[in-house]
């Protein structure tokens, strides 16, 4: 708006930022901080305080239980380790008890005559002594002597059933003597002697395969190098398949070696007796992991070789010992998991057999070791839980005492958070801070309530006058003033006009001079006689122009005299200024946008003088039909309604429904004849007939000069003239494009087209670059003149290809992003004379019709590119779907009726009715009402338009109101509504 410049030359005071702008700034800061700060979960004060008490107790109980758990666990683990050490020591002592008596036996036998006896009978005579030693040492499984000449003598008890079965001993046999003797020049002879308990010989068995040579055994060879007893590594005995050790001693009185075997089976049983818990696993293994002693020794025969060997620890029934051997270290307790169970294990060195490479493996299930501790922990947890439950009422009571005072404030804060800023009844509280908080919350509620009321009015009331009255009323109430008034500037006026008033303000007139400055003034109240203060605020917009003035009247008290009151009122006026300016700006933009659309529609109509008014009449009819549907309370369209935003979107779509026609060529849109191409080419053809006419005259004159019969020559010329007149009249009639062209007419056109005339001028002169390029491309070198030309021709240069201008409307085109589904003709334009004259109905070729239909493609493409707001997002579809059909055979996207809303169907009906009744189209006569409605009924029957909507259009007689405004009187005839409706029946 134009404003009169200010008369006051002094610079105005710097206005404070409008309150709306400052609020937006603060809200944006708060919003950004809210986005950056994660939301915290809050809890009621009562359970919080109780929870703090309970949490503290739980924390103390947890710490105590945890410390007790770990200390008890450590004690149990230490106890288990000590027990393991004890078990290893006990096993070592047991091993020593096995070895020491055996060593004494060897020392005794090393001086016995047995070691010097040269023959087998003398040696067998000492068998009672050997048997006595076996009885005295039950852990000794065999006593034997190896002689220097290779002889060998061994005695063993037959107490083990497996050994008896393996050696096939007789039932009465209690001892077995195995002997090997060697005679010069004879092979070794092996014999088994079985004796009963009384040492009487039961039987003797010669063993030819018993070829034992003691000198090759390790116990014999090692004893040769030492004067003391030699202890072998644990190994599997060849005969009995038992794991044991051998002690051997070189006799001081001969070269014989005395030895004995001790089976370690009892050592494995002793290990089983040393279990800490029922699930404890113990095993004695060597450095390679072979099992030396175990409670349930595995089979010692190698399945692959069939020889007795020590089996690895991995073959034991439990994998816990194997896992312990791989992960454990000597003397270090380790906790691990094996076969889904938790274990506590330790590896201890074992040197009872004078070896350093033997280990005892001991592992205990953690559940068995710590079972009692877990029960103790559970008991302590239950005790702590009971104490917590007993103390919970105490915490709840403390929380209630404190929380009750805060709940009132919290409830009010919740109501404010829930957009309820009403003041609740005051409740006394002994807490000073809470009482102060109550007072502050009440003040905030009052202020925010007034502030939000003003904001609501500013944001929701579209009418400036109503908005100003409501805002002023809220502002006066919020500031506790006696009254106020708002004056707005008027265009090209020197005064401001009062638009809103609250209170009895007879002192303020309906107008305010523009030159008035905001300044305090004292007025006399007529009611109370108290002094009243007046203050004025400029309503200044973003551009610095004064939009109006706010005048407030208030009592001259301390509260209103404070600077805070003036600042608060000034901020509220800033919001009012922004609202006024924004409303005016939106209204101006809307008016500008509507005007631009109308200018575009007028430009499209003005582009073609024959279609003028189409872009204006279609919106009028569409809006008339939409308003009639919206008013229906019954029937199929009772649920149809348009909001203000939807109505405006429909209004815009109706005005823009043919905006794509701005790209359509006028000579195609307005093509009144078939040969129209910028101009009507019938004149070219008429000129060719003129040439043929003169050719007939020339032929007549030449005949007379040659002496032919004058009458005959004249008759022939006249006949030719008459034929040319008739042929041209026929071609001109075909060019009109009225009724349907029959096959006979097309054949006659082809026949006439074959008639030739002589061209004497170069047809490549004066052509544009494109025309010349097409001519040379299709014809090649120019023919020698003169040349015969057809009277009517479809020349190759008449066919203009698409080239780079091919539109993306076919379904398979990757450039087609809007879902077009149109059949593209072979050429962009076909200017052939026969091709155009042979059009059977109307004046448009297939190429022309596509060029016209393409306007809807441009319509959708143009509208889709515009940044429509959300409430206008459907404008492109409403505008571009009025050429779609209910049966899906329309264009440009072949949408079925189910994909179109009622608004699109209204547009289709309005566009067709206007096109049928338009009286400004040169290529067709104006149709009457009845004829137009009958055609539309047939279109509905063929699936072109919505039948139900057409019936409503027919019965509502909207067409009658439209006809009264836009149809010629000759077009308005009687309409049989029932008969036309009956055409839609199957």
Image (cartoon, helix red, strand yellow):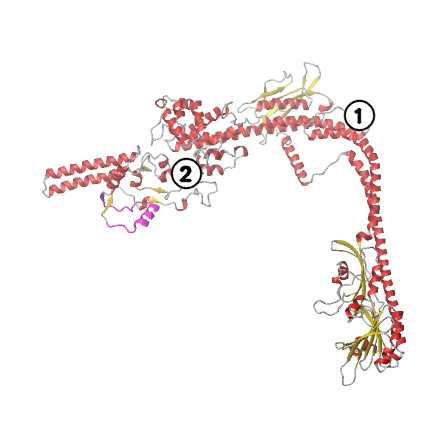
Which element type, helix, strand or loop, lies under badge 2? helix
Q: Position of residue 58 (x, y in %)?
A: 81, 42
Q: Is residue 20 magenta?
A: no
User: Which quarter of the image is occupied by the C terminus?
Assistant: top left
Residue 854, label in figure: 2
Q: Quadrant of residue 600?
A: top left
| Looking at the image, residue 872 lies above or below residue 262 | above
Q: Which segment is the magenta one? A: 756-784
| Looking at the image, residue 779 lies above or below residue 98 | above
Which element type, helix, strand or loop, lies under badge 1? loop
Q: Position of residue 977 (x, y in %)?
A: 40, 22
Residue at the spot of label 1? 428
Q: Quadrant of residue 90?
A: bottom right
Tag 2: Cα neighbours inside 10 Å, few (<14), some, or many (≥20)? many
**Mark earlier in primary sequence (1, 2):** 1
Residue 738, label in figure: none
Residue at image position (22%, 43%) is 757
Query: Which residue is more in the foreground, 180 or 752?
Result: 180
Q: Residue furthest bottom?
A: 185
Tag 1: Cα neighbours inside 10 Å, few (<14), some, or many (≥20)? few
């Amino acid at each position: 708006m134009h404003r009169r410049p200010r008369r006051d030359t002094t610079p105005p005071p710097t206005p404070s930022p409008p309150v709306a702008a400052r609020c937006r700034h603060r809200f944006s800061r708060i919003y950004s901080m809210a986005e950056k700060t994660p939301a915290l979960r809050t809890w009621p004060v009562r359970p919080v305080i109780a929870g703090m008490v309970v949490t503290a107790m739980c924390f103390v109980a947890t710490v105590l239980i945890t410390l007790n758990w770990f200390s008890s666990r450590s004690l149990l683990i230490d106890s288990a380790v000590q027990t393991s050490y004890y078990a290893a020591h006990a096993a070592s002592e047991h091993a020593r008890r096995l070895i020491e008596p055996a060593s004494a036996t060897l020392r005794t036998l090393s001086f016995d005559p047995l070691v010097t006896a040269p023959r087998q009978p003398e040696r067998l005579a000492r068998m009672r002594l050997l048997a006595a030693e076996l009885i005295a040492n039950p852990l000794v499984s065999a006593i034997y002597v190896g002689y220097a000449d290779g002889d060998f003598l061994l005695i063993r008890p037959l107490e083990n059933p497996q050994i008896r079965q393996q050696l096939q001993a007789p039932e009465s046999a209690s001892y077995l003597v195995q002997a090997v003797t060697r005679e010069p020049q004879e092979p070794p002879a092996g014999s088994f002697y079985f004796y009963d308990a009384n040492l009487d010989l039961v039987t003797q068995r010669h063993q030819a395969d018993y070829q034992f040579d003691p000198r090759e055994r390790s116990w014999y060879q090692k004893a040769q190098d030492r004067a003391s007893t030699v202890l072998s590594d644990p190994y599997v005995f060849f005969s009995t398949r038992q794991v044991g050790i051998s002690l051997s001693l070189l006799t001081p009185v001969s070269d014989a070696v005395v030895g004995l075997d001790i089976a370690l089976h009892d050592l494995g049983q002793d290990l089983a007796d040393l279990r800490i818990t029922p699930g404890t696993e113990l095993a004695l293994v060597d450095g390679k992991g072979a099992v030396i002693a175990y409670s349930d020794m595995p089979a010692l025969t190698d399945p692959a070789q069939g020889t007795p060997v020590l089996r690895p620890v991995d073959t034991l029934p439990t994998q816990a010992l194997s896992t312990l051997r791989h992960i454990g270290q000597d003397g270090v307790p380790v906790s691990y998991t094996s076969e889904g169970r938790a274990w506590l294990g330790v590896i201890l060195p074992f040197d009872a057999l004078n070896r350093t490479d033997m280990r005892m493996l001991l592992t205990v299930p953690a559940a068995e070791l710590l079972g009692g501790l877990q029960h103790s922990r559970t008991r302590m947890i239950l005790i702590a839980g009971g104490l917590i439950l007993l103390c919970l009422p105490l915490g709840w009571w403390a929380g209630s005492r404190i929380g009750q005072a805060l709940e009132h404030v919290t409830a009010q804060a919740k109501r404010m958070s829930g957009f309820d800023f009403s003041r609740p009844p005051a409740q006394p509280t002994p807490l000073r801070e809470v009482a102060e908080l109550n007072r502050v919350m009440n003040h905030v509620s009052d202020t925010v309530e007034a502030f939000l009321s003003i904001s609501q009015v500013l944001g929701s009331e579209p009418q400036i006058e109503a908005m100003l009255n409501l805002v002023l009323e809220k502002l006066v109430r919020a500031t506790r003033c006696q009254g106020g008034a708002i004056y707005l500037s008027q265009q090209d006026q020197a005064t401001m006009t009062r638009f809103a008033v609250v209170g009895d303000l007879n002192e303020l007139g309906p107008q305010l001079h523009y030159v008035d400055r905001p300044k305090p003034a004292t007025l006399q109240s007529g009611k109370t006689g108290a002094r009243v203060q007046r203050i004025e605020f400029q309503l200044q917009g973003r551009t610095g122009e004064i939009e109006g003035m706010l005048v407030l009247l208030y009592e001259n008290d301390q509260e209103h005299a404070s600077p805070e009151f003036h600042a608060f009122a000034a901020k509220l006026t800033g919001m009012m200024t922004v609202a006024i300016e924004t409303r005016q700006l939106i209204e101006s933009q809307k008016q500008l946008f509507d005007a631009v659309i109308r200018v575009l529609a007028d430009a499209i109509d003005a582009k073609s003088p024959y279609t003028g008014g189409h872009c204006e009449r279609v919106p009028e009819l569409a809006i008339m039909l939409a308003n009639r549907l919206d008013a229906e309370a019954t029937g199929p369209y009772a649920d149809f309604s348009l909001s203000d935003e939807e109505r405006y979107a429909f209004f815009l779509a109706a005005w823009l429904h043919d905006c794509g026609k701005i790209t359509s060529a006028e000579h195609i849109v307005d093509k009144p004849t078939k040969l129209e191409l910028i101009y009507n080419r019938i004149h070219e053809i008429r000129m060719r007939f003129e040439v043929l006419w003169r050719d007939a005259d020339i032929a007549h004159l030449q005949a007379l000069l040659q002496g032919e019969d004058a009458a005959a020559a004249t008759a022939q010329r006249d006949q030719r003239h008459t034929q040319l007149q008739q042929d041209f009249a026929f071609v001109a009639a075909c060019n009109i494009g009225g009724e349907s062209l029959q096959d006979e007419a097309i054949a006659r056109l082809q026949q006439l087209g074959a008639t030739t005339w002589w061209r004497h001028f170069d047809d490549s002169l004066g052509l544009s670059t494109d025309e010349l390029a097409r001519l040379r491309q299709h014809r090649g070198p120019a023919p020698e003149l003169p040349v015969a030309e057809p009277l009517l021709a479809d020349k190759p240069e008449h066919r203009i290809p698409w080239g780079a201008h091919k539109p993306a409307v076919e379904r398979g085109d990757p450039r087609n992003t809007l879902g077009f589904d149109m059949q593209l003709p072979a050429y962009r334009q076909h200017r052939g004379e026969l091709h155009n004259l042979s059009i059977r109905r109307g004046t448009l070729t297939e190429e022309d019709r596509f060029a016209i239909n393409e306007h809807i493609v441009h319509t959708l493409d143009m509208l889709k590119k515009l940044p429509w707001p959300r409430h206008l997002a459907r404008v492109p579809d409403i505008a571009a779907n009025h050429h779609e059909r209910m049966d899906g055979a329309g264009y440009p996207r072949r949408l079925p009726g189910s994909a179109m809303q009622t608004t699109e169907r209204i547009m289709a009906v309005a566009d067709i009715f206007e096109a049928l009744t338009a009286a400004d189209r040169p290529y067709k006569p104006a149709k009457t009402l009845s004829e137009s409605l009958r055609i539309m009924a047939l279109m509905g029957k063929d699936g072109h338009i919505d039948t139900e909507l057409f019936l409503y259009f027919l019965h509502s007689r909207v067409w009658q109101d439209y006809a009264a405004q836009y149809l010629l009187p000759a077009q308005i005839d009687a309409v049989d509504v029932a008969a036309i409706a009956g055409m839609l029946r199957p």
